[in-house]
Amino acid sequence: MSNSIDEILKQAKLSKEDVITLLQTDKIDRNKIFTHAAKVKADNVGKKVYYRGLIEMSNICSKNCYYCGIRMDNKKAERYDISDKEILDAVKFAHESNYGSLVLQAGEITSPTFTKRISNLLKQIKEISNNELGITISLGEQPEEVYQEWFDSGAHRYLLRIESSNPDLYYKIHPKNKKHDFETRVNCLKSLQKVGYQTGTGVMIGLPFQTYDDLASDLFFMRDFDIDMCGMGPFIEHHDTPLYQYNDLLMPIEDRFTLTLKMIALLRIIMKDINIAAATALQAIDPIGREKAIKVGANIIMPNVTPGMYRDSYKLYENKPCTDEEAADCTNCMEMRIGITGDDIGYGEWGDSKHYAKRRQQI
Ligand code: 5AD
Ligand code: SF4
Ligand code: FES
């Protein structure tokens, strides 16, 4: 077995069977994958981590994804919507802390008022930061005109997870209706690319009903879609969601964690020059989960800059880290954490996806 893992890793291109084999490796063999991925990272994007200060601006959501703690029908979730002033204060904090970039994230709302509000915020962020802060947004499915308006207002990266690239599995974890349509999701990703965003997607790992074949397909979906960025993390069950009824089907949480690290490492091997985030959900399972992800291929981290009083309410999953902290606590903590990985921090840099730059040159 050991030899064959070495052989597989030496190949220029991995087949689906190879990926499935690699996803199922035991401890000794998986360390070979991790070592290989770390080298691919160092050779292609360098041993450097970029910050995206994360602002979770609102947990109000019009959707009902079966896995998510802030789904519309979860009456137990206490809803909040941070004021523009508080958002801009968080922006100033990120700018003064030299974070380089921001992520604006919220539950999914589609309305002309919301569109305008975001456009205004984007313009103000650019102004406050003298155009020094890069901006990623993660605001769900929207019409192409809205994506265009936000792009023109200053956002240049967009994150929209496909959650699973297998439509059958997609409909097991979402209601089957117009608001949760797999095709729409894929079309939104296409629109984002067309508008010109650095486009990011990702999946959850360790979902009920998910197979190794599904996960291998997810990696090839990302490759074939030619994405620029990825944020993927372990599925973490939430008591107040419909998917909780399938808890018995889940693999142990430690295994979901390890499988996520393998997915990150394999994606780094397959897509050498994209940006890969060390998902916050990893830290809900292992206190140094994000650092482990950086070691095996991730190069983006999202320190939370949401005002502390709101953090506990943005609970997509249980055990979410940093909910008792304020932004400044995370800054100090994060610097120490990255120090341990041996990577440098790209303070004040946008840290754009190298893959995007190459993709644009080819057009
Ligand atoms: N476990 C892990 N990730 C989750 N997300 C939502 N709910 C969960 C959960 N229970 C992720 C989804 C979504 C992102 C904002 O958070 O992938 O795209
Ligand atoms: Fe809303 Fe996103 Fe949660 Fe789905 S995953 S319910 S769209 S916040
Ligand atoms: Fe938030 Fe450590 S990163 S407290």
Image (tube, rainbow, N blue to C red):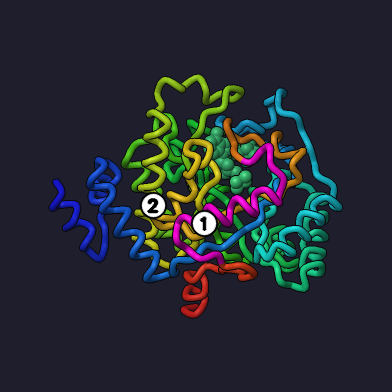
| Residue pictured at 77% horizontal, 73% vertical | 130
The residue sitting at the bottom extreme is 361
Quickly name the residue at label 2: 219
Q: Look at discs 2 and 1 and give the one toward the viewer.
A: 1
Q: Is residue 31 above or below residue 99?
A: above
- 3D distance between C-alphas at marks 2 and 1: 26 Å
Q: Residue 338 bears which disc, if any?
A: 1
The magenta stretch spans residue 160: no
Q: Residues within 10 Å of mark 2 (few under 14, many from 20)?
A: many
The magenta stretch spans residue 330: yes
Indicate the position of residue 285 as horizontal and vertical percent values: 48, 36
| Amino acid marked by disc 2 | Leu
Label 2 SS: helix
Indicate the position of residue 121 as horizontal and vertical percent values: 80, 59
Tags 2 and 1 touching, CB below 8 Å: no
Nearest to the observer: residue 154 or residue 96: 96
Indicate the position of residue 53 as horizontal and vertical percent values: 66, 56
